[in-house]
């Protein structure tokens, strides 16, 4: 274990432990957008989690999500230098994603009502003026779901995220991991009849899977196929049922041969 100090709080941590994760665990607020514990390697894209580090009489600014615990580290999360940089970042995000409500709320917290920078605008914006290009949707799709449906397109101020050539991508699982992980609620999807439509990703359509017993739509075909391939051999009676019907059938099977309780 190593001893570190965050603001005025002395803490013990495992050597190499992620500082942002440690701070959040200890109830120390450090704003962040691109960090998610599902990923083994954070990459500090949003820069909002910057902190000031004091070590061996040196001071420097770095991202807390990529900072590892070392003995004797002193970390300041709200020093004047950190706040100054964070305010500039939030102004840039207000220009980049003017419709993102949580960016607006975070900016208000730091006393920022509007940005000095011109708002980013596209003729067609599939992400509704909410995307900050943090890359979480790309990472979860590629690294976790192993689908790789979306990626960055273009460079510099023209950078955006979408499917290749802005066309429907048949590799989409319809898992909605991208929707759930987005920190600004930029990614949207809807269910229409028997299809899941990823509105943000060039209207990509994914067919839904119907429960063999009750007829309800409970997942998408590609996700069902992928899950089935990853699981051990499953009872064929169960594999095409929705969670509710699965549960009911399992209860029936498990209780079928149980002895009845004896009367008093």
Image (tube, helix red, strand yellow):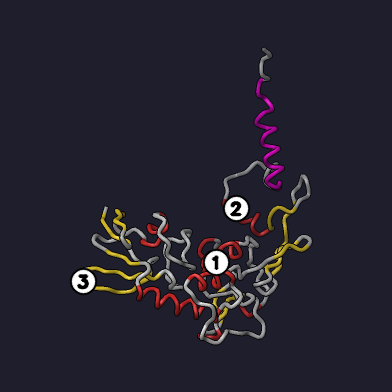
Which of labels 2 and 1 is toward the front? 1
- The residue beneath circle 1 is 183
Q: Residue at x 59, y 62 (%)?
A: 180
Left/right placement of residue 15 relative to residue 154 reads left
Q: Tell me the residue at 39%/54% (across/down).
A: 26
- Mark in front: 1 vs 3: 3
Foreground: 142 or 24?
Answer: 24
**Whole-percent x, y for residue 96 in the image:** 55, 80
The magenta segment is 240-259
Q: Nearer the viewer, residue 12 or 202?
A: 12
Identify which residue is drawn at 28% across, 64% down: 74
Q: Position of residue 202 (x, y in %)?
A: 67, 75
Residue beneath disc 3: 57
Reading the chain from its start, which is encountered first: label 2 or label 1?
1
- In the orientation shown, which residue stands out farthest toward the front? 111
- Residue at the extreme top of the image, as rendered: 264
- How far is disc 1 from disc 3 in space, using C-alphas? 36 Å
Q: Depth check: 127 or 58 in front?
A: 58
Q: Residue at x 35, y 71 (%)?
A: 79
Q: Which mark is residue 22?
A: none
Q: Secondary structure at mark 1?
A: loop
Q: Left or right: where does residue 3 sit relative to residue 101?
A: left
- State the CA–CA distance, disc 2 to disc 1: 30 Å
């Amino acid at each position: 274990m190593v001893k570190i100090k965050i603001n005025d709080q002395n803490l013990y941590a495992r050597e190499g432990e992620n500082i942002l994760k440690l701070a959040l665990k200890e109830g120390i607020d450090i704003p962040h957008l691109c960090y998610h514990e599902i990923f083994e390697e954070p990459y500090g894209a949003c820069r909002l989690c910057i902190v000031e580090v004091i070590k061996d009489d040196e001071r420097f600014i770095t991202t807390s999500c990529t900072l590892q615990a070392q003995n004797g580290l002193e970390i300041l999360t709200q020093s004047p230098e950190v706040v100054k940089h964070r305010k500039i970042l939030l102004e840039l995000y207000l220009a980049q994603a003017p419709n993102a409500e949580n960016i607006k709320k975070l900016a208000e917290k730091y006393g920022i009502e509007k940005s000095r920078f011109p708002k980013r605008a596209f003729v067609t914006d599939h992400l509704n003026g909410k995307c900050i290009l943090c890359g979480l949707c790309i990472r979860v799709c590629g690294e976790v779901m192993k689908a790789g449906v979306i990626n960055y397109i273009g460079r510099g101020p023209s950078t955006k995220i979408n499917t290749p050539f802005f066309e429907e991508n048949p590799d989409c699982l319809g898992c909605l991991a991208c929707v759930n992980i987005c920190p600004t609620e930029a990614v949207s999807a809807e269910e229409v009849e028997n299809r899941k439509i990823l509105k943000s990703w060039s209207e990509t359509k994914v067919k839904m899977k119907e429960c063999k017993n009750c007829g309800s739509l409970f997942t998408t075909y590609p996700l069902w196929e992928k899950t089935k391939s990853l699981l051990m051999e499953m009872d064929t009676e169960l594999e095409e049922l929705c969670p509710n019907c699965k549960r009911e059938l399992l209860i029936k099977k498990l209780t079928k041969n149980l002895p009845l309780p004896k009367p008093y």
